[in-house]
Amino acid sequence: MEKEMIQKSGGLDIVEGFFTRGVHCGIKKSNNDLAIIFSEIPAAAAAVFTTNRVCAAPVELTRMNLEKNHHIQLVVVNSGVANACTGTKGMEDAILMSQMAAREFNIEDPSLVAVASTGVIGDFLPLN
C-alpha cells in the first residue's frame, strides 16, 4: 500500500466519518485494482452471502468477521484475482490481506476488516 491513493469526489466520501480510495497496486496491468471504504469508527454492519457451499476465502473470512463483531471499520476490495478455489493458501492470503489493511489504517483488530476479491478464479494474490 505504498502507492498513493486517489480520492474520487462524491459517493461515500460525502458521508461524514467515511472515506473511499482507489489505487493501482499491480494486480492488473493498468487501471485501479484496489479499493477501500474506511469508517473512522467501527460501523454496525450486515451482509448477505451466497448460499453455495463453495465460496471464496474472502467470503468465508468476512462472514466469520461479521459473526464475531457485527461491526466493520474497513472494506478492502481487490480486482484482478478472485482468490477463489485457492485452498488453504487462499484463506491465509485473505487473512494477510485483512492484517495488512488493518495495519495500514491503524485498526487494532483485523477482524474489523471485510475483504473482497473479484477476478480470475484459481490465481493467488500477489501479496508481499
Image (cartoon, helix red, strand yellow):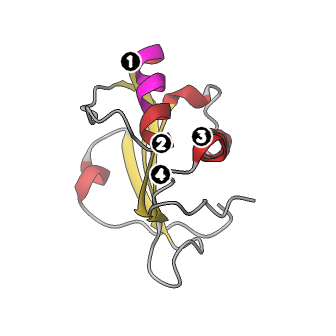
Q: Nearer the viewer, mark 4 or mark 1?
A: 4
Q: Nearer the viewer, mark 2 or mark 1?
A: 2
Task: Tell me how far mark 2 sits from mark 3, CA to CA.
Answer: 7 Å
Q: Is residue 47 visible?
A: yes
Question: Which stretch did the figure color magenta?
Answer: 62-68
**Is residue 80 found inside the magenta-colored segment of the image?**
no
Looking at the image, is 110 positioned above or below residue 87?
above
Viewer-nearest residue: 95 or 5: 95
Viewer-nearest residue: 106 or 1: 1
Q: Which residue is mark 1?
A: 70
Instruction: Say which amino acid is labelled 3.
Output: Met
Find out whether the residues at labels 2 and 4 contact each other: C-beta distance under 8 Å.
Answer: no
Q: Which residue is mark 2?
A: 58
Task: Tell me how far mark 4 sits from mark 3, CA to CA.
Answer: 9 Å
Viewer-nearest residue: 116 or 18: 116
Q: Nearer the viewer, mark 3 or mark 1?
A: 3
Q: Quadrant of residue 102?
A: top right
Q: Which residue is mark 3?
A: 91
Q: Residue at x 38, y 18 (%)?
A: 70
Q: Residue furthest top?
A: 68
Q: Which residue is mark 4?
A: 84
Which circle's residue, 4 or 1, is located before the other in the chain? 1
Q: Secondary structure at mark 3?
A: helix
Task: Tell me how far mark 4 sits from mark 1, CA to CA.
Answer: 24 Å
Q: Secondary structure at mark 2?
A: helix
Instruction: Say which amino acid is labelled 2.
Output: Pro
Q: Horizontal placement of 19 versus 98: left or right? A: left
Viewer-nearest residue: 53 or 21: 53
